[in-house]
Amino acid sequence: MDYKINGQIYEADEIEVKSNMTEFKISRDDAVRMYFEDLGLVEAGGKTAITPIETSKTKRTYIKSDKPRKVSSRERKIDETKKGLLAGFRIYIEGKGGIVTSIKNEVEVSFTFGDDDYTLKLTKHRKSKK
């Protein structure tokens, strides 16, 4: 544990402080004062204040590992219902005279109708909990 004496911070040897406490049957404060008196930092019988200081936690250091990360392989699930609906929209659009330019997965259909460009986006909502 660290202690402040005359504006400077010193560290006390905990093993020696505890051995002094048991050997001389004295309190922790007296054992700490005895330790610093033996070092010559405090005068024997003096009134110098010895204040304990809480040690601050050290910051964690994060080091990148040498091992490469395991790459997870996740297969994409194809929503057959949405795929069928978009195929139906494609047939309808082409039947009305539109030209389908692209179909993105099971999400959207882009097409031109006349001189204008359109995008039809299909969203599947989750069931409500009620």
Image: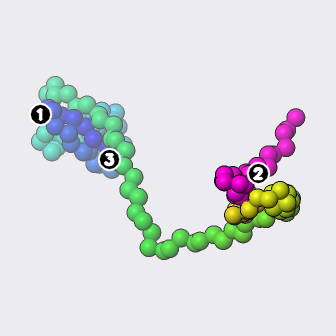
Q: CA distance from mark 3 to mark 1?
A: 21 Å
Whole-number angstrom distance, CA of label 1 to CA of label 2:
85 Å
Q: Identify the residue at horizontal 81%, vertical 46% (top origin).
A: 126
Nearer-the-camera pick, 58 or 128: 128
Residue 86 appearing in the image: no
In the image, is 117 to the left or to the right of 89?
A: left
Q: Residue at x 16, y 28 (%)?
A: 48
How far across and how far down the image is residue 100, in percent? 73, 62
> Does residue 123 show up magenta in the picture?
yes
**Closest to the observer, 53 or 79:** 79
Three-letter amino acid code of the residue under disc 2: Leu
Q: Nearer the viewer, mark 1 or mark 2?
A: 2
- Quickly name the residue at label 3: 14
- How far across and how far down the image is residue 75, in percent? 72, 69
- Bounds of the magenta segment: 110-130
Amino acid carrying label 1: it is: Glu
Gap between marks 3 and 2 measured at Cα? 70 Å
Q: Which residue is mark 2?
A: 122
| Residue 49 is at least partly visible in this image | yes
